[in-house]
Amino acid sequence: MKIKQLNELEGLATSPKLRKAYTQFNELINELNNRDLHEDTIKLINIEVDSIHSSNSIEHTLVNLIRIGQAKIIRLVEKKHKIVPKNYYRKFWSVLGMSTFGLPLGVVVGVVIMENIGMLAIGLPLGMIIGHAVGSIMDKKAFKEGRQLNIDLKNGL
């Protein structure tokens, strides 16, 4: 069973955002078609594609619908098959690092060591750097194990 492609949409020629979202979504589908996915995963992905087809949305709403569908597909494939796009973990852990490592570091540096709550924000960039490093390591591991798609999604997660 193959994953369905998006049908040709109206307004692709006039809307650069819609064209970009449409092209990126179809590239994701092409990459996933090259992978060995379970039948139930393919059915769920096809349901997402059908929901985009059945939409009568205007340009801006359709772009958002495509991006939301793309994010759902990425989460599904990551959860069930551990297959991720390029830089998936780096993007995820950069944000997570700021909240997981950055805020506690900022509290320690700002409140405990310097006794100045204004220095709390100094931990955020440190946390982002730590998260970026952890995510890059995980991306390299996914690439070595063959779990990485050959696509880097913009505005996808």
Image (tube, rainbow, N blue to C red):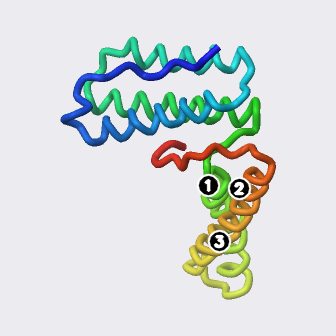
Q: Compare marks 2 and 1 and give the one earlier in the sequence.
A: 1
- Of circles 3 and 1, which is in front? 1
**Where residue 20 sits: x, y (%)?**
36, 41
Label 1 secondary element: loop
Instruction: Kindly identify the amino acid type of the residue bearing the numbered disc 1.
Output: Asn
**Where residue 38 sits: x, y (%)?**
74, 20
Marks 3,1: beta carbons within 8 A = no
Q: Which residue is mark 1?
A: 87
Q: Quadrant of the N terminus?
A: top right
Crowd band around label 3 with a 10 angstrom C-alpha radius: few (<14), some (14–19), many (20+):
some
Measure the C-alpha gap from mark 2 to mark 3. 15 Å
Picture quadrant of residue 100: bottom right
User: Where 144 sits versus 54, above or below?
Assistant: below
Marks 2,1: beta carbons within 8 A = yes
Q: Which residue is mark 2?
A: 139
Crowd band around label 2 with a 10 angstrom C-alpha radius: few (<14), some (14–19), many (20+):
many
Q: Quadrant of the C terminus?
A: top right
Q: Which residue is mark 3?
A: 129
Measure the C-alpha gap from mark 2 to mark 1. 6 Å
